[in-house]
Image (cartoon, coloured by chain):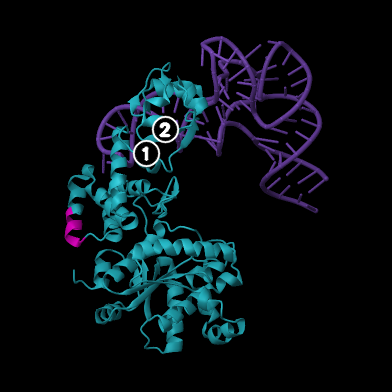
Chain colours: A cyan, B purple
RNA sequence: GGAGGGGUAGCGAAGUUGGCUAAACGCGGCGGACUGUAAAUCCGCUCCUUCGGGUUCGGAGGUUCGAAUCCUCUCCCCUCCA
């Protein structure tokens, strides 16, 4: 596809707001630009919320541009007030360092090491003395302007510390630094970053001259059709770390997206081209029950994050778990599929199902409930429906006596690991 | 310190002329039907139980054949006054 990157982002619905879009289009036509987004090292794994700006960077990268991810090793120690209604607690430098290392590894999985750079603003912010900061940058920021930024004004009622108030200056210094030393001309961020990014552009203009070409591009707020926040499930965040969220669960997250959202997500999170997306859109409208779009979405994103093999395994596990035919799952697949499903240790002894469900495994909280579920036909042991409350559970009959897979209801699974 | 109001099951909220109330109703949760691993809807269950019964209504004690409901003491919360 020879579409200009900005045009491509436009049809993908990925742009919320930009500075001079015509100049941006021209700039990206004329040369391969440097661009960046910042990530605060507030945790030790990326989650799918991070994927939102990363998808943008990736698209630029695929067209030959030079993405840079800035890890806020310096600012992370300060706390960005954006999107927060109360003061953040500070992290220790050790935590920040640990998180930074974990995140960098994950980013390299997504972007490779060619034509991609990770920088840490600690490297330059930490060298800035207070006096230099005040003389070189502080002078260029007008407090009235800063107060008017949405991020700050929304906090005036509840209060904001000087530290967080200063955040926008630091982020501006970052942009300036990258503009000067990494040839970065565009900063990307969530819609709530607009104020911070434009503050940086103002700084660049003041120092580098009004004709310096620095741009801002923000991404629309991702909301689900039901109005709730994208990326959160009952079980919490969806992580990119396969130890925290298994590839199977990751795959499941995407396959479960609402019809109303799926095309939007496909446009945003996959590299599928326009023609095929049109087809999928048509399919959602005419044959929603096939959920082809959801499958493609899940496949594509899972492959991007975890690789081809992970997709194949996730699909195998999916097939087994949803058909109930769990018998042919491998040990590794069981481990993965049940990563974040309830699991418990159990003895190898054969015993009555009610006692086993309540006392041995704790799957059911009372005998009353256990009986009810068994009698309702809600319980399956290794895929076999059990409706007799006097039946026994014999762990030795499947999976070499290592596991007993319990399914309650249509899709709730439990894994008993036999000791 | 003074005057009121309140603490009921996961949450919200009835019930306070003592028994018919293991405790209405709503939400949530769990099953089932339908279905597309959806949405909506409908149905059942939702303190424990060896199914005889047992233990609950902030806590302790008392009155009574019998209390979430009455009395005493006590802890906590809210509102108003100081």
Which quadrant of the structure image shows residue A288?
top left
Seen at 56% across and 81% down, the residue is A128
The reply to whether label 2 and label 1 mark residues of one chain is yes
**Quadrant showing the N terminus of chain A:** bottom left
- Residue for point 46% across, 73% down: A196
Name the one closer to the observer, A158 or A196: A196
Residue at the extreme front of the image, as rendered: A400
Spot occupied by residue B74 in the image (x, y as percentages of width and height): 79, 35
Q: Find the distance from the CA under tag 2 to the CA under tag 1.
A: 9 Å
Give the numbered dot on residue A379.
Answer: none
Please rate how many residues cluster around mark 1, counting C-alpha atoms within 10 Å: few if below 14, some from 14 to 19, many from 20.
Answer: few
Residue A180 shown left or right of residue B11 in the figure: left
> Mark 1: which secondary structure?
helix
Q: Relative to A73, is B35 on the left or the right?
A: left
Residue assigned mark 2 = A402
User: Is A63 a magenta residue?
Assistant: no
Which chain is indicated by disc 2? A
Principal secondary structure, stretch drawn in magenta: helix
Note whether A375 is above or below A189 in the view shown: above
User: Residue A320: where, in percent of width, then height?
Assistant: 30, 37
Write down the quadrant of residue B47 in the picture.
top right
Residue A274 is covered by the magenta coloring: yes
Query: Where is A408 relative to A150, above or below?
Result: above
Work out whether residue A221 can be spotted: no
Question: What residue does disc 1 label?
Answer: A331
Q: Are marks 2 and 1 in contact (CB under 8 Å)?
A: yes
């Amino acid at each position: 596809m020879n579409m200009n990157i900005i045009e491509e982002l436009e049809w993908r619905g990925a742009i919320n707001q930009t500075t001079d879009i015509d100049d941006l289009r021209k700039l990206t036509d004329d040369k391969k630009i440097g661009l960046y987004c910042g990530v605060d090292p507030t945790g030790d794994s990326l989650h799918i919320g991070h994927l939102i700006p990363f998808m943008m960077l990736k698209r630029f990268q695929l067209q030959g541009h030079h993405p840079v991810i800035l890890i806020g090793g310096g600012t992370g120690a300060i706390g960005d007030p954006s999107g927060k209604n109360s003061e953040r607690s500070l992290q220790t430098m050790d935590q920040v360092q640990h998180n930074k290392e974990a995140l960098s590894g994950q980013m390299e999985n997504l972007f490779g090491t060619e034509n991609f750079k990770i920088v840490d603003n600690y490297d330059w912010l930490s060298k800035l003395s207070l006096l230099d900061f005040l003389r070189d940058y502080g002078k260029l920021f007008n407090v009235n302007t800063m107060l008017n930024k949405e991020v700050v004004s929304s906090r005036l009622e509840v209060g904001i510390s000087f530290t967080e108030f200063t955040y926008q200056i630091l982020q501006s210094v970052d942009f300036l630094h990258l503009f000067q030393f990494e040839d970065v001309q565009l900063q990307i961020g969530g819609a709530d970053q607009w104020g911070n990014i434009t503050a940086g552009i103002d700084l660049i203009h003041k120092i580098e001259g009004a004709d310096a070409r620095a741009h801002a591009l923000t991404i629309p707020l991702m909301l689900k059709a039901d109005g709730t926040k994208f990326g959160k499930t009952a079980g919490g965040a969806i992580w990119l770390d396969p130890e925290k969220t298994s590839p199977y669960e990751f795959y499941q997250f995407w396959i479960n997206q609402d019809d109303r959202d799926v095309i939007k997500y496909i446009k945003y999170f996959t590299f599928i081209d326009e023609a095929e997306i049109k087809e999928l859109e048509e399919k959602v409208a005419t044959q929603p029950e096939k959920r082809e779009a959801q499958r493609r979405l899940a496949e594509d994103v899972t492959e991007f994050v975890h690789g081809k093999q992970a997709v194949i395994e996730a699909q195998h596990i999916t097939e087994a778990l949803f058909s109930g035919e769990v018998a042919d799952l491998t040990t590794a697949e069981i481990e993965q599929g049940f990563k974040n499903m309830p699991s418990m240790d159990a003895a190898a002894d054969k015993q009555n199902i009610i006692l086993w469900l309540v006392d041995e495994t704790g799957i059911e909280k009372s005998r009353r409930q256990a009986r009810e579920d068994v009698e309702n036909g809600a319980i399956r042991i290794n895929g076999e429906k059990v409706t007799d409350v006097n039946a026994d559970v014999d762990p030795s009959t499947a999976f070499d006596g290592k596991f007993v897979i319990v399914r309650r209801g249509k899709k709730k699974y439990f894994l008993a690991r036999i000791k």
